[in-house]
Amino acid sequence: MEITALSNSSSIDHSVIVTFIAEQGLSQGNQSLPAELSTMLKAAVERKQVSSKLGKSATLVSGEHTLIVVGAGEDAKRDLGAFDKAIAAAASALEAVEAKTATAVIDTLTIENKSAAQLAERAATEFAKATYRYTETKTDAKPAHIESLAIIGDEASVAKGAAIAQGINLTRRLGDLPGNIATPSYLANQAEALASEFSHINTKVIDEKELETMGAAAFISVSKGSTEPGKLIAMEYLGGNDGDAPYVFVGKGITFDSGGISIKPGQGMDEMKYDMGGAASVFGLMQAVALLKPNVNVIGVVAAAENMPAGNASKPGDVVTSLSGKTIEILNTDAEGRLVLCDALTWAINEYKPNTILDIATLTGACMMALGNVNSGLMTENDELAEAIIASGKTTNDRFWRLPLEKEYQELIDSPFADMQNIGGRLAGATTAACFLARFTDGQRWAHLDIAGTAWQSTPKGGSGRPVAALVDFLLSDSSK
């Protein structure tokens, strides 16, 4: 869907218009509609044909115009969640009338301490998210009817919101694709396609043979059990000054996770196609960056592999030497994400010498059990970095909760046969996974984001696109300081 901005309602040329009505009834924002529609709305309010109840919609028709009125709830209670619900209801109403083009008047959909520009940005993002349809492997699937939407608001803000939505929807699409399509090679091809589309993106792909030659045995210990070769993918955007240390985002890209020899239970295993949610969010971030063109250097790294059982697959008790030279005892082959990530982090640090490095991963069931699907987990030893990420989560309603990473937890992953083991036992599973990664990021401005509970939902099943919005906000706000 194409999303554009209009400066005011006098330039509306679409026959379908969406507006919002708060509990207080007609406000200046409603009255800013063209005279004919404002009169029609006022009459509908008096006849109680429309409701201010949050998400409740009504469709009014006058001549050639269709006016969709959506309840915005109480001004005092409206937060980002309520805002999103109102936008989603508006998008559903547009779909119901099969509108191909429309205009959205959002000036009554206010939130305390949020500027009109911020809300125009969010409206663009939420409208575009609402048009997402998974169609690739369904013969009867149809895209949303809406093809273009004009939002009355600041042009730059609307464009930014639309760019973020493109990234979010790309992340959702990559996650929703089945594992027999979205293989490591497919992800590499997607990265190369991004570089073809945007001249300011450059892509590097390191194949499994080269990884083995490099000494990335931790990565290879995961990928070698599959007939699909693993790939280390880097997407480079150099929008800053020459020599400026980049922001690096490393995504776990396990395109299917059977658990390996430590095989998972069969129930729900189909959802393990989403174990590349961290990688998918890095793709979404880079898509948004390519569109927004910020003045900063950004590198997106994807560690892509399948985790499968085979005669040559890693066994519990195996010891491998990581790219850093540190040895790892593999006690559980289902704790594979940290094995590909540790080599990806080592490579990215050596290759790019980052200003900041974040890894994003559907890493632990322990984090999912602790935080559910509301907050993503955040672990870092850097208080200032934690505060910046949490602030971006609050700004975008893509929230994080900080979990501990004190040094006392490190002893849980000490091994009698190697420098470390890849699991720490039953206690503090999300933290011990982060402790493992911390051993490969010493001295870096680094944070680990565990999105196991937030990257997708099971009912209805589908990718969420998180935490792309928060990553974009963090990158833009942190790099501007």
Image (spheres, grey):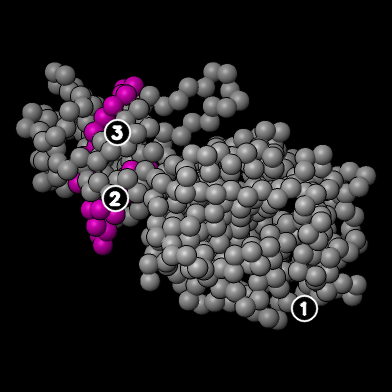
The residue to which callout 3 is attached is 149
Mark whose residue sits in front, 3 or 1? 3
Quarter of image, res 365: bottom right
Q: Is residue 148 above or below residue 205?
A: above
Which mark identifies residue 157?
Answer: 2
Which image quadrant: the N terminus?
top left
Which mark identifies residue 411?
Answer: 1
- Residue found at the very far right of the displayed protein: 311
Quarter of image, res 227: top right
Secondary structure type for disc 1: helix
Nearer the N terminus, badge 2 or badge 1?
A: 2
Q: Nearer the viewer, residue 475 or 144?
A: 475
What x and y, as percent, mark residue 459?
57, 39
The CA span between labels 3 and 2 is 14 Å
Q: Residues within 10 Å of mark 1 (few under 14, many from 20)?
A: few
Answer yes or no: is residue 436 visible.
yes
Q: Is residue 359 above or below residue 456?
A: below
Give the residue displayed 64% in from the left and 43% down from the top: 188
